[in-house]
Amino acid sequence: MANIFPPEFADLEPFADWAIPTERARYAKRIASTMEELDAFYNAAFPLLESGTSYLEKVEMDTISEEDKRLLWLFCALVTVAFPVEAWRQPRVPDAGASSIDAILEPAV
Amino acid sequence: MAHFPKPDAGSWTEHLKIGTEPLSFEDSISPEFYELERDAIFRRTWLNVGRVEQLPKKGSFFTKELDAAGASLIVVRGSDGEVRAFHNVCRHRGNKLVWNDFPREETSGVCRQFTCKYHAWRYDLEGKLTFVQQEGEFFDLDKSDYGLIGIQTEVWEGFIFVNLDPENKTPLREYLGKFAAGIEGYPFDKLTQVHKYRAEIGSNWKLFIDAFAEFYHAPILHGGQYMAEERRKIQKYGYEALAYDVDGPHGMVSSWGGIAPPHDRKMVKPIEQALRSGLFGPWDAPDIGMAMEDLPSAVNPTRDPRWGMDSFVFFPNFMLLIWRPNWVLTYHYWPTSYNTHIFEGTCYFVPPKNAFQRLQQELAAVSFKEYGLQDGNTLEATQTMLESRAVTDFPLNDQEVLLRHLHHTTYQYVRDHQRRQTQTQPAS
C-alpha cells in the first residue's frame, strides 16, 4: 500500500484526517474539535514541521507529488490549529461569537 | 513619550486641518443617511470591483453585486482584449442576464456570448444585441438600439474600477489622486497567488474601515495573539504611526515594522518561529525586482528604515495595504444596509516556489483571518451600542485621524449631493 505521506513523515499517518485541501474545511475541523484533539495533533505535527523545513524547501510547487500535497495540507492544518493551541486555548477565536470569515478563493494546492 | 516625530502643528489631525472636536457616528446608524450615501457616493464614485487577473482571456467574465448602488454588473474581457462593464440586465424584459442557480450570488467563467435564460436574447462580449428569438414578432425592433447598458470602466495598475454615474466626467487617475500616482510602478502583476476571504458583518461599512484605519486598538483587542511578554511590551508602548496623509477624499497611514522579523525571537509564537512568518507576512521577502529603497514614492513616504507597511484608504470602500515583505492585502466593504455590509479581504503573494514558502504564506493569510474575526465581531457590538444613542459624541485621538477624515468626507459628499439636487429642482 502506498504511503499517505513521504516516509520521513510516517509518524503523521494517525493524523491523516488533517490532510484537508481547503482552508474552509480545515477551519471547520478545528472548531469541531476539542482542545485535547487539537493538542494531540499539534504535539505530533509541530516537531516534524521544525525538523522538516529543509525537506519542505526542496518540494517544488510546480512538480509536487500527491504524497507531498497531503503533507502540505496537513501542515496547513497545523497552521490553522496553532492559534488555539499557542494563543487562544480554545478552538474558536475569543469574542468572535457567531461571526465567520470564509475563504472563497485560495490556491489549488 | 513620542517615539516618532509629529508635524510642526503638534498633531497629525491639526496638521491635516481636520478638526479635533468629538465625532458623531450618526452617519453610521441612520437608515435615512444610508439612503443618501447610496446616491451621493456609491452611484457616483469610482469603485474597485476586481483585478485584471480575474479576466485572463477573451470572454472571461465575472459578475459583481453592488447592493449599495442597487446594481449588478457583468465585467468582461471583450474580443478586442478590452475590459468593459455592463448592467447585468436583459434589454427585453429586465431579467438578470448572467447568474447561476441563485440570482443574488456572484459568478464567473468564460463564454463567447451572453444568452438570457428567459427568452434566449443574445449579446456579444462587447454588449451588442446579436439575436432575438422570433424577431419578426416584434414591432420595428432595431437590434442596435438594444445593446447592454455600458458602465464607465477604467483600469489602474491592474485594478478594475467602475463608475455608475453616466454623467461622471472625472477620469479614474484624477479621482484616485496623488497616492495612486505615487504607487504606480509597484509590481502588482508579480503578486498572483491569491487568498480571498469574505464575511457578512453586522455593522455600518464605515465602522470596519475605521477599525482598519487605526492601529491604536491592536495591542489591546489583539493582545491575546501575542506571547505574554510581547503583549505587555506592546501595551505599554502603545501605537504611533510613522506618518498620516490625506488627499481629497483619500487617506493613508504609514506604519513601522512590528514583528517581521522580530529582534527578540522569544517574542513570537512557536509557529511563527518555525515558519519565519506571521501577520506581517513571511520574514524573507521574495524578489519583486525592486529593493525597498526603490519602491514608488508614495510607498514608505518618509523613507524610514523601520517602515513595515502602508495602508491606503481610497474613498469610498477600497483599502490597499502594501507590506514590507513584498506582499499586498486589499479590503473592500460593500454595504447591504445601514447596519450590515459584506467584507472582502484578499491577500496577494508572489507565487511560492516550494512547499515551505507556501506554508509561510498560509500563516500570513490565516493570521489576517484570526485578527479579522475579532475585529468583525467587535464591530457588531459597537454598532448596536451606537444605535442605542445613549452616547452621541465620541473623542478621537491623533492616531484616529483617518476615521475623522472618512466620516467628514462622507458628510461632505452627502451635503454636496443634496445641494446639487436642490439646485437642479425646478423653481415652484
Image: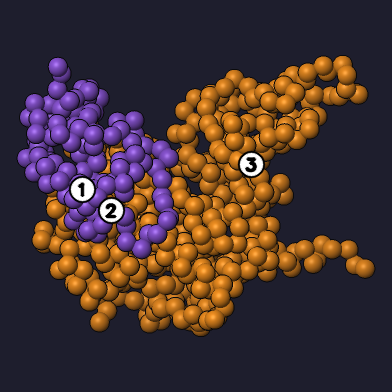
Query: Please, is residue B136 above or below residue B180 in the view?
Result: above
* Colour of the chain lettered A: purple
Disc 1 is placed on an element classified as helix
Going by the numbered disc 3, the residue's amino acid type is: Ser
Instruction: For the residues labelled 2 and 1, say whether their Cβ atoms are less than 8 Å apart.
Output: yes
The tint chain B carries is orange
Amino acid at circle 2 = Pro
Chain ID, mark 3: B
> Compared with residue B147, is residue B156 higher up or lower down, i.e. above or below?
below
Q: Tell which subunit mark 1 falls on.
A: A
Is the same chain shared between marks 1 and 3? no
Q: Are the numbered discs 2 and 3 placed on the same chain, yes or no?
A: no
Q: Position of residue B71 (x, y in %)?
A: 66, 45
Residue B341 lies, with reference to residue B198, above or below; the image says below
Question: Can you tell which mark lies on residue A91?
Answer: 2
At a point 16% along the width and 58% down the height, the residue shown is B268
What residue do we see at 42% from left, 65% from top? B378
Query: Which one is in front, B140 or B364?
Result: B364
Q: Which residue is mark 1?
A: A38
Q: Is residue A72 left or right of residue B59?
A: left
Q: Position of residue B189 (x, y in %)?
A: 38, 37
Q: Residue at x 17, y 25 (%)?
A: A4
Which residue appears at 67% of the width and 38% of the height? B87
What's the residue type where badge 1 is placed?
Leu
Task: Answer with left or right where residue B381 lies relative to residue B85.
Answer: left
Residue B72 is tagged as 3
- Asked where in the image residue B131 lies, by quadrant, the reply is top right
Labels 2 and 1 positioned on one and the same chain: yes
Which of the pair B159/B87 is nearer the observer?
B87
Residue B88, given in percent of the width and then of the height, sits at 66, 36
